[in-house]
Image (spheres, rainbow, N blue to C red):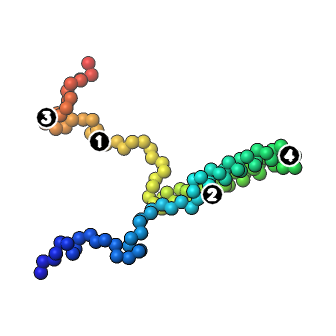
Amino acid sequence: PLEDSLETGPTLPTSDREAKEYRPFARRLPEFKFWLQCTRGTVMCFFMTFFSMFDVPVFWPILLIYFGVLFFMTMKRQILHMYKHRYVPISFGKAKYKDAGVENSEFGGGMAGAYKGR
């Protein structure tokens, strides 16, 4: 028996679960709240510089090591995430093909032979 094309085609959603719009990216933190928190933190730190009780001495090699550890831990996580999704973060230039720019057809095509390096 032949099937009716009206019955086999796309249909309207029949439940609430099917009717929900697909949203591939949902933000955990809205952009406005992010910038508000960044501004508050910057202003608070600026005013804390005027009081000597917040002037904590730091031995610079420890601070440098701390920065290095945080940087490498974060980058390791990011690079592993990129490799997981098959994204290669480093490329060594443009792909080169064997006969790029050389006319090999019998007709030459376009401006073939117009400029011969005079």
Measured in 3D between alpha carbons, the distance from the residue under mark 4 to the one under mark 1, in whole angstroms, is 68 Å
C-beta proximity under 8 Å, tags 3 and 2: no
Precedes in sequence: disc 2 or disc 1: 2
Precedes in sequence: disc 1 or disc 3: 1
Label ID, residue 73: 2
Q: Quadrant of residue 105?
A: top left
Label ID, residue 98: 1
Residue 31 in sight from this viewpoint: yes
Measured in 3D between alpha carbons, the distance from the residue under mark 4 to the one under mark 2, in whole angstroms, is 33 Å
Q: Is residue 16 above or below residue 35?
A: below
Q: Is residue 115 above or below residue 68?
A: above
Label ID, residue 107: 3
Q: Position of residue 10 (x, y in %)?
A: 26, 69
* Badge 2 density bin: few <14, some 14–19, many ≥20, Cα 10 Å: few
Camera-nearest residue between 47 and 113 = 47
Q: Which quadrant of the rendered structure holds the N terminus?
A: bottom left
